[in-house]
Image: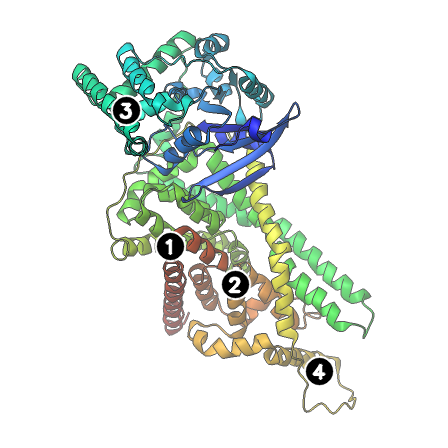
Amino acid sequence: MSRTNSDTGVLQVALAGSPNCGKTSLFNGLTGSRQHVGNYAGVTVERRNGYYTFDGQKVEVRDLPGSYSLSSFSPEEMIAQRELVDERPDVVVVVVDSTSLKRSLVLLAQVMQNSKKIVLCLNMSDEAKKSGQKIDIPLLTKLLGFPVVETVGHKNVGLDQLKERIAEAAAAQPRKSRLMLGERLERAIDHVADALQSTEAPNDARQWYAVKILQNDPLFVNRILEMGAAGKAVLDIAEKEREQLESFTGEDVSMYVTERYYGFVDGLLREVTIQVSHIDTRILSDRIDAIVVHRIMGIPIFLAVMYGIFWLTFTAGAYPMDWIDQFFGFLADTIVAYWPQNQAFEVQSLIVDGIIGGVGGVLVFLPNIVLLFLGLAILQDSGYMSRAAFLTDKLMHKFGLHGRSFIPLVTGFGCTIPGIMATRTMENERDRLATMLVLPLMSCGARLPIWMLLIPAFFVPALHAPMLFAIYFIGIFLAFLLALLLRNTVLKGEEAPFVMELPPYRLPTLRSVVSRMMMSSWAYLKKAGTMILGISIVMWALTTYPKYSDPADTGDAVPVAAADTASADKEASFKQLEHSIAGRIGKFIEPVIAPLGFDWKIGVATIGAFTAKEVFVSQLGVIYALGEDTSETDLTLRDELAQDYSPLIGFSLMLFLLIATPCMATVAITKKESGSWKWPALQFFGLTAIAYLLSLLVFQIGTLLGL
């Protein structure tokens, strides 16, 4: 039984609306941080619930999956229908894009057939007004018989009024629907709905049940069949009404019903719309699209935009990176300077070498993370990401990827986990699996600190942005090739069709962009302050124990020069590292990775990167803090790496870290989303094997060429 206000004391409100209508912005504005995200039972579509309080009344808001209608074609539409028909929320808020009311209001017409308490939310009303459109809200409210409110979700405009209208709708007595679909269709619907009174069909949803039975929808037909003889009688009546409608109209009932929905919307808009000018909101978008979505220039423009973001990430991020690096260096030097001599040296080493060397080595790249996510947020909020999906659609199909794969793949640049979860919108299971399996090849934000460390260490400044662009491009190229291989072997089958919508361009708001950027950056900070901190401490312990004692050390003090002392300390530090647990692990795997140009130190750091990719940086930070005496040379970690390894080894290492060993969180989410261990196993071992082979070829061929 569904929960209602009277059952629990909590008002149940559902937000329904099409994709790109701003529904999620309204949900975030209403509920703030009081949100819970999970999955609908039995499917992989995300469920979002949140709460707010209005006039002492606690309100639970359900953000339904974006859908253009309440049909039973896509998982989103089926779930939205199930939530409204079966769960029976107290109030349904239908959110529509005010700039495209004709298309958006069809969903409202369908909701009017299964809900009595409704609020119509005209979102993006500012854009509609700029285009010269004006809606007579009082008249619209009168014609519909329920509250109507104008909002601007991404600016939190109209939220108080929306809460008031929700409370108003909840308190009002249920009214008969004022939906008008034409005399013949309404008569057929009424006949079937009257017959449903003898069944268990919900009272408020009988009109909707009648429509779906007339359309011969298998989901509702099967429900009615389960009701026994009464259900069979309803289906007989529906069959007669269907035959009469098709005989009169000469067309399929489903098509006729859709036409009547649009007819209702057209008539409603003619009554309430006042067009004070003839400005088309899409004219500017179309003019911009003539350039950026051009069939020849579109792809080069997209690549130039992405290159610009990478250039900005490196150039603008260099200064704050240096400030953070200097701060952690100052902090470590201060602790060492004021630490009591010969007292609790291991605690000092833990703080300076383990915590500051590990976590500080990761936090130094926070400015780059912020800038990258800033650029992606602007592209997404402006509407350009949808254009990029359109541009790459044909190319992706040639490589076996679906058009809907674009958004998950782009999301993977931030983090692979939400990228894999974003594949839930894909209906074809083969397309979905192919996208999930290649997603780790998108260079995620966790790898960015690695590139920020390795690229400046091995390449001159003029090559920094090109190398960053290249490593991202290599990942994309390999993802396409691997997808092509998968779709022609283990995932062979037909591809699902792809139809997409290009929303009008919008100027990103500061609040929205900063919110997206801060959420991603905060997730990075939390990881650095929790998991990476813990791993850094574990890594410090693995590089510190067991303690190494020099058998040649007799304990007799022998005067030596300062230079000899520094050299002896450095040698002792390396012997300690080699003698430690981490050193022994590294030495054990060194013969396997040596053909790639890697030594035991890189091997140890690479193993640690399985927990989280950015841990590679903190691992090296701990190793070099313990393995080198930098008090005299004041070398940074980049300088240390540049001294120990060649650019060829650096590039081989970048390739390996780009492709190999998806992190443990990626393996876990792939298992969860695919429902089987075979797919994450194929992903993990397959990508690692490819990484080993490519790094081997690069290093060995480069060595033969004298690089």
Mark in front: 1 vs 2: 1
Residues at discs 2 and 4 in contact (Cβ within 8 Å): no
Image x and y of residue 439, in percent: 41, 52
Query: Looking at the picture, does residue 606 appear above or below residue 62?
Result: below
Q: Is residue 648 visible?
A: yes
The residue at which mark 4 appears reads as 564
Image x and y of residue 426, in percent: 35, 42
Query: To which quarter of the image does residue 352 belong?
Result: bottom right
The span from disc 4 to disc 3 (Cα, nearest Å) is 98 Å
Colouring mode (rainbow / by chain / secondary structure / one colour): rainbow
Mark in front: 1 vs 3: 3
Image x and y of residue 408, in percent: 41, 45
Side of 638 where 235 appears, left or right: left
Q: Which is more N-terminal, label 3 or label 1?
A: 3
For numbered disc 4, what is the local secondary structure? helix
The span from disc 1 to disc 3 (Cα, nearest Å) is 47 Å
Q: Which is more N-terminal, label 4 or label 1?
A: 1
The residue at which mark 1 appears reads as 437
Which one is in front, 317 or 269? 269
Dividing the image into 4 quarters, which one contains the C terminus? Answer: bottom left
Residues at discs 1 and 3 in contact (Cβ within 8 Å): no
Crowding at mark 1 (Cα within 10 Å: few <14, some 14-19, many 20+): many
The span from disc 3 to disc 2 (Cα, nearest Å) is 62 Å
The span from disc 1 to disc 4 (Cα, nearest Å) is 54 Å
The residue at which mark 3 appears reads as 234
Q: Which is more N-terminal, label 3 or label 4?
A: 3
Crowding at mark 4 (Cα within 10 Å: few <14, some 14-19, many 20+): few
Tell me the number on the disc at residue 609: 2
For numbered disc 2, what is the local secondary structure? loop
Residue drawn at (39%, 52%), measured in percent from left and top?
674
Q: Amino acid at mark 2?
A: Ala
Q: Which is more N-terminal, label 2 or label 1?
A: 1
